[in-house]
Amino acid sequence: MAIDRREFKKREYTPSATCRLFHLSGKKIKGIRGPVGSGKSVACCMEVFLRSCGQEANEEGKRESKWLFYRRHAVDLELTTLQTWLEWFPETRMKYDSPMTGEYRCAHPSGDGTEVVIHLVMMGLETDEDIKKLKSLELSGAWGNEATQIPWKVHSTVYERLGRYPRACGGKKYPRLGLLMDTNSPHESNWWKRRSEDIRDENEEYFTQPPALLREWIERGDGVKGWKYTPNIGQRDGVLPAENVENHNEGFAYWLNMVRTKDEDDIRTQVLNEYGLSVAGLPIYPEWKDGWHYRPGEVMFEKGRLLVAGLDFGRTPAAVLLQMGRDGQVRCLEEVVSEDMGIRQFCEELLIPVLVERYGWGCGTRLVCFADPAGANPNEVDSVSAIEMVNACGIECWPCDVAGNSFVLRSNCVKELLRGVRDGKPAVVVGERCKVLRNGFNGGYCYKKMAGGVLGEERYAPGPDKSSFYTHIQDAFQYGVWSLLRGNRYSGGLIDGGSGGTLLLGNRLPESRFSVAM
């Protein structure tokens, strides 16, 4: 019986630079991350077709494959993912059951007489029951649209179901056609960031598109400050031009109009293609302006001047290294963060090597550490306090002298510093080695949102979200800043041995409180 092979209808598809690399990759797991409207989903649709065309023909001359298209929510799958596919392959015959299924057929583009047959299964993976259904599927390949909204464990389960269709027959075996994924930039804690930066599987590869717009912090003479957004046409060294601009009716105005209505985190993830922040509440420091306070390449250590460290304890010790310049500017030089580590191990394996290798500790640089006051309390095992352990490691350490360890006092001290100006420059600057601290300032350090708001009114806890990873480094920063600006009755004064015995404190406290040695 003759097979009805539908004619292949040519499509005008010109991939962007990044999408071209995506298509050239033969990896079994590959993903592409980019701004909204950058052509990622179209690239995945075309990759499904290309890989299906590469499937080996069976005895009937059919190149058959079965693909799963999936997203977090079924409604998004139907309204966006499916619509993108149908825009390019409108001949697909769909059945809007649960789950949705479809079939696309065409003659092979090469004209070799074979037929390409693509069976589609579309699922929203919203519940545990949805995920359990995956284990009964036999698939050739899969496309996870907006993949970062779904845990990696689910993608791994999907990958296990690939290479099962068609079944081996007549000596022919059909390999898995691959797991394709696309996404806008997720929050920095998302699995995508970890896997793309530390690829351990040789069959895995990730691609990143350039930002749609570029921005710079502008301060006009009339005191107006803010971000200036410009189309990314390749004017910045090392940054490729924006992609898929020509396919938007408004061109770059598509994204320029977005920044007028989006908040900071949406702009970062959807326009600038930068990782966002896991903000689940109200940012604690609205005074922070990233373009004003973050100064990569400008925050330099002055040899011979006093080095101050703020330190937080617990099983996630964190330290931030600070130095006050001769102009009174506080400089955040570097952070040291950890997970599941005791304070002695933290000091010996992480903190001390940084101090010795980068800051000349032990060779002329004086370091004073100010820590969580709770660290002065002896532990229940050997009656030794965390602060005593730090001192035993050779680091001069004192409890931060803030009344009741008040979060309000500490955070207000930081707010005042963020608002400050020294000779036309910010009173505090953060360097490129303070990544977690910076991300906390950008919104990761926040008041936790609470349930029970009336008529949509949002309620927040009075203190920071203690479960957040950003809290530890921010607490350490507060201890260091408070001690620099407000003083410390325990340490006997902070003396800069490299500047003629100058008191390294703000002008808020009388010098009589401190013993100043020459």
Image (tube, grey):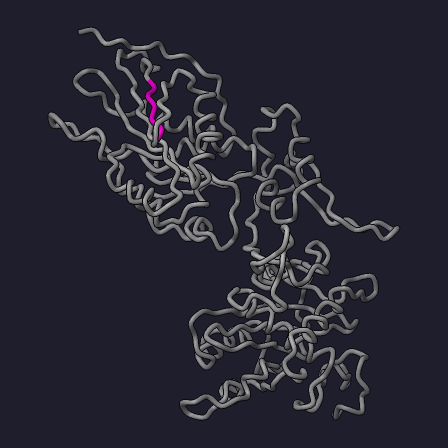
Where does the image place residue 506, in percent across and percent down from the top left? 78, 78
Seen from the viewer's position, the closer of residues 464 and 295 is: 464
Q: Is residue 255 above or below residue 298?
A: above
Name which residue lies at 32% across and 16% down. Answer: 105
- Between 211 and 60, the one nearer to me in the picture: 60
Residue pictured at 82% horizontal, 87% vertical: 510
The chief SS type of the magenta part is: strand
Res 228 quadrant in image: top right
Q: Which residues are magenta?
A: 99-104
**Residue 223 is inside the magenta segment:** no
In the displayed structure, does residue 63 sit left or right of residue 283? left
x and y percentages locating residue 407 in the rendered image: 64, 74
Residue 434 in view in this figure: no
Residue 103 among those drawn in magenta: yes
Residue 172: x %, y % from top left: 15, 27
Residue in the picture at 48% in, 73% down? 350
Q: Quadrant of the N terminus?
A: top left
Q: Based on the displayed image, in which of its 4 quarters is residue 119 positioned?
A: top left
Quadrant assignment for the C terminus: bottom right
Residue 470, x across and y down, in percent: 55, 64
